[in-house]
Image: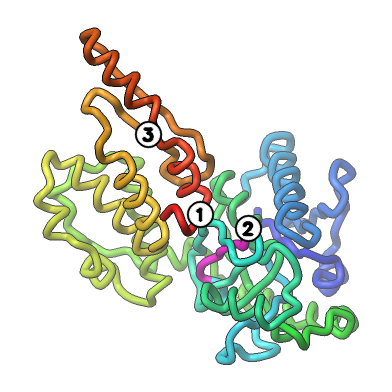
Amino acid sequence: MKLLSFAHKNEASSFLEAFNYTPLAELKGLFKSHDHFLLITGEGQIPALGQINKALSLLIYKYQIQLTEHINMGICGGLRESIELGKIYRVRSLYAEKSFNHMQFQSYHTNQGDVDLVSSYERVKSDKHKDMLSAFAHLVDREAWSLARASQEFKIDFNCYKMVSDFAGNDTNCFNIQEQAHKFSDKLYDFYKQLEDQNISADTIVKSTESALDFSNFHITASQKNKLDKLLQSACIAFSKTPEWVLAQLPMNEIENLKPAKKRTSALLFELECLLNPVKKNIVQSMNEVIKNTPKNFHVNYDPEFENTEINIKLSLHSEKQKQELANYLKDFPLNKLQSIINGDENAI
């Protein structure tokens, strides 16, 4: 079954009128029809994240529902002049603002899309704020990034469609937008019915990007193959190019010369992730630069997705001399520097 989500009930009004929904008593804002669920998430990154986590936990763990797709719909603001008012866009990549002029480094990607979206930490009411966010995305909302994050954690395909109600900045008129909410909802409903009629889904898009690429030179496990397929599909959609073009953007000669073969696979997956999220490569390079002088028997590990700032250290001791060397190194270990890089401190990178 599918899950549809909207920030506000007004945005979902046409859906609530068209489908015979039954509210679920366990969670306010969660409704069930014969073939899908609908969730009102509330506005903002944190409220939406809490609401979607409650809904997914309830549906998956208590009711044992197999959710095939999460579709987020609603209105948003435009950040760039190329954006058309009243148009519904398919979102490609989702970013988030942590605080003014500071971005979250985690980004998420849909199985299809034309433009990028950033979820702001507060409503964008100034041109200064709009101009800062426009460097990262075409559209702005308040919660889609959180919904994409939860969907990824629960391993559910996520797609996002947003209608541009206005341009963010000094001229934003929230009251005027609220007055037109039902009209916007009608357009979103018509768009959704078109999706249903055309049978457009994540599975359809995935199949269209399949390619007979030769990875015989690589040692790829089943889980790595699954990750490789998803990364290639996301890149094909993000750049509107073929898998062959995507691989041509990577340092394939360097990767194929690595030994052993499993090292090539790790490098390939990493380069694909960095192609989709260039900021990640900058973080990894900065982290490696800081710990490059680490003693050989002292191994520093961190969360590869940078979801937390925990640094794990593994070491081996064979002599008193090594113990003293490691004690000296630990005394000056750059923990604050590493955590600052993970947190996105521009001065640390």
Q: Which of marks 2 and 3 precedes in the sequence?
A: 2
Q: Earlier in the sequence, mark 2 or mark 1?
A: 2
Q: Earlier in the sequence, mark 1 or mark 3?
A: 3
Report the side of 81 relative to 43 (left or right): left
Amino acid carrying label 3: it is Asn
Residue 75 lies, with reference to residue 148, above or below; the image says below
Nearer to me, 166 or 309: 309
Give the label on residue 344, or none: 1
83 or 27, nearer to the observer: 83
Q: Is residue 94 magenta?
A: yes
Residue wearing tag 3? 301
Q: What separation in Å lies between label 2 and label 1 (alpha carbons)?
A: 10 Å
Identify the image's colour scheme: rainbow, by chain, secondary structure or one colour. rainbow
- Which range is magenta? 92-98
Vertical side of 68 occupied by 17: above or below:
below
Q: Are marks 1 and 3 in contact (CB under 8 Å)?
A: no
Percent coordinates x, y for residue 323 in the rendering: 28, 13
Q: Amino acid at mark 2?
A: Lys
Contact between marks 2 and 1 (CB within 8 A): the answer is: yes
